[in-house]
Image (cartoon, grey):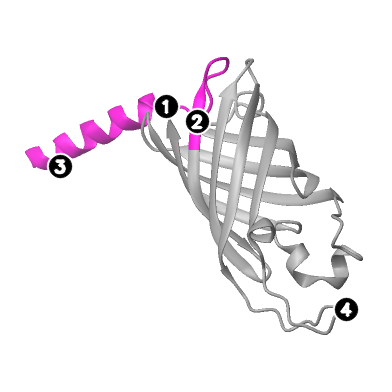
Amino acid sequence: MKAIYTFLLLLSFSTVFGQAYNGANDLKFQVGANLQDNGTGVVSTLDYGIGENISLGVKGIYLLGVEEFSSITPEGAFEDAEFGDRFDLRVRFNAHLGNVINVDSRFDIYPGLDLGLKNFGGHLGARFFFTEGFGLFTELNVPFAKFTQDDDFTVSERPRKQLNNQFNVSIGASFNL
């Protein structure tokens, strides 16, 4: 019985101190999985609070599991995803709404914009902290404007160019630093 009371006491302390977003100077690191058509990979973000409800950050994605593409290039060869197709780096702007809509202080929902190597897009994320330093997050990402490169005819004609340039979902762990 003492063990149960001790466990409940520790659990209550851990949930009291966890906060999803603390405002200016708040620093969050997230790492997890990125899921999209034709590929899965790892994602990491680092966000720094510059105001009560605003943060700026960076996001990196690298796709590890990429399906083999059977499309043929104009030259008649099969194409594989290159490093530049698998990798994306983005700067991000987030508006944290958790305390605005008065939900639990451990929960935060944050829409935002991002500018990356492949596109300009938006994201909608949510995170929940179980303790002061650990929580879970999920983000939905969508491109608004896709950038093209010299070797593109159109993005849709080259399936490997869709990698990191389409709707994708990220899930993983979030940490207070």
Towards the viewer: 8 or 65: 65
Q: Quadrant of the C terminus?
A: top left
Q: Which residue is mark 3?
A: 4
Residue 74's tag is 4
Number of the front mark, 2 or 3: 2
Residue 85 image position (x, y, % from top left): 69, 60
Disc 1 or disc 4, which is closer to the eye? 4
Q: Residue at x 69, y 34 (%)?
A: 92
Which circle, 4 or 2, is nearer the viewer? 4
Vertical placement of residue 109 versus 43, above or below: above
Callout 4 crowding tier (Cα within 10 Å): few <14, some 14–19, many ≥20: few
**Closer to the N terminus: mark 3 or mark 4?**
3
Which residue is the site of mark 1? 177
- Find the residue positioned furthest to the right: 153
Contact check, label 2 and label 1, Cβ < 8 Å? yes
Q: Amino acid at mark 1?
A: Leu
Q: Which residues are magenta?
A: 1-29
Residue occupying the point 70% across, 57% down: 164
The CA span between labels 1 and 4 is: 49 Å
Q: Which residue is mark 2?
A: 28
Crowd class of label 2 (few under 14; some 14 to 19; many from 20; radius 10 Å): many
Q: Position of residue 81 (x, y in %)?
A: 67, 68
Residue 105 in view of the camera: no
What separation in Å lies between label 3 and label 4 (alpha carbons)? 68 Å
- Is mark 2 in CB contact (under 8 Å) with mark 3? no
Quarter of the image containing the N terminus? top left
Question: The residue tagged with tag 1: helix, strand or loop?
Answer: loop
Marks 1 and 3, the one that precedes in the sequence? 3
Report the residue at 29% width, 27% height from top: 13
